[in-house]
Amino acid sequence: MVDQMAMLEKISNLRSPRLNSTFAYNQGSTMVFSKGGFLRLESLSLFLLTNIEEWKVEEGAIPRLYRLHIGSCSKLKTVPVQHVPSLVLGEPMK
């Protein structure tokens, strides 16, 4: 089984991916962004990832992320912002 997230987080120039239902995340119900991964990521959109219940961001991952969009991820319980110093939290979309 190929770990798609491990492959994605090593793409050095990836800045603004949109992960949705076509992203066949087959690693179970936990999505992990590893230390040193996604070093240039600035914006991230997660949409219709219906099997994701937990999202872990290790310290040192996504250090430049400042924009995050999440929609229709009904099982996702928490958003791990503690290790994302550049993320600006705004008002929820209506």
Image (cartoon, rainbow, N blue to C red):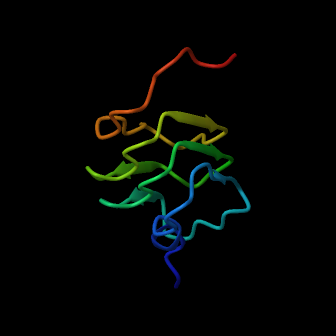
How far across and down, in percent of the image, does residue 11 sit? 52, 68
What residue is at 53 percent from the left and 67 percent from the top? Answer: 8
- Left or right placement of residue 94 versus residue 61 in this view: right
- Considering every residue shown, the one lying at the far right of the view is 22
Say which quarter of the image contains residue 25. Answer: bottom right
- Considering every residue shown, the one lying at the far front of the view is 13
In this rendering, is residue 85 above or below 73?
above
Judging depth in this view, the residue of 72 and 14 nearest the camera is: 14
In this rendering, is residue 52 above or below 1?
above
- For the C terminus, the quadrant is top right
In this rendering, is residue 8 above or below 16?
below
Judging depth in this view, the residue of 19 and 14 nearest the camera is: 14
- Considering every residue shown, the one lying at the far bottom of the view is 1
How far across and down, in percent of the image, does residue 59 sit? 26, 49
Number of marks in the rendered image: 0
- Left or right placement of residue 45 versus residue 9 in this view: right
In this rendering, is residue 29 above or below 2?
above
How far across and down, in percent of the image, does residue 78 sit? 42, 37
- Left or right placement of residue 36 versus residue 44 in this view: left
Judging depth in this view, the residue of 66 and 13 nearest the camera is: 13
How far across and down, in percent of the image, does residue 75 sit? 54, 43
What residue is at 73 percent from the left and 62 percent from the top? Answer: 22
